[in-house]
Image (tube, rainbow, N blue to C red):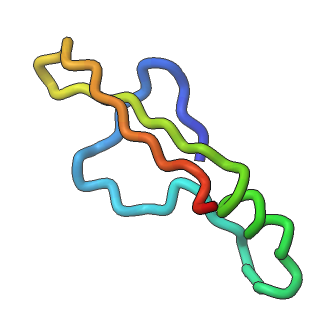
Amino acid sequence: MTFNQGEVIATDYEQHLLSVASYDRQNHVEVEDLINRRLTLMIRYESLYGGENYTAVLGPIC
């Protein structure tokens, strides 16, 4: 999933932001390591009224 500056998603959006087609734990060890130990996801968002500049951050597990 790729988002561009100013792009808007619906409040009831229920799809994965990051996924691997045909995921197999043994074949995708590097992907799991990337997600769990090296990837930081930062989402900046506002209400419809704007100006709040909220941020949600999900960092590495260990």
Residue drawn at point x = 66 percent, y = 63 percent: 36
Residue 58: image location, x then y, percent: 48, 49
Residue 18 vs residue 31, the one in the foreground: 31
Q: Is residue 28 left or right of residue 44?
A: right
Q: Quadrant of residue 62?
A: bottom right
Residue 55: image location, x then y, percent: 35, 31
Q: Tell which residue pokes out farthest to the front in this image.
A: 62
Residue 35: image location, x then y, percent: 67, 59
Location of residue 39 with respect to 36 vertically, above or below: above
Residue 8 vs residue 44, the one in the foreground: 44
Location of residue 31 with respect to 28 vertically, above or below: above
Residue drawn at point x = 50 percent, y = 19 percent: 5
Location of residue 58 with respect to 62 vertically, above or below: above
Q: Is residue 22 left or right of residue 42?
A: right
Residue 33: image location, x then y, percent: 77, 65
Q: Quadrant of residue 50?
A: top left
Residue drawn at point x = 54 percent, y = 43 percent: 41
Residue 37 vs residue 18, the one in the foreground: 37
Location of residue 44 with respect to 1 vertically, above or below: above
Q: Is residue 27 left or right of residue 48?
A: right
- Counting labels gives 0
Residue drawn at point x = 54 percent, y = 25 percent: 4
Q: Is residue 14 left or right of residue 24?
A: left
Q: Tell which residue pokes out farthest to the top in this image.
A: 51
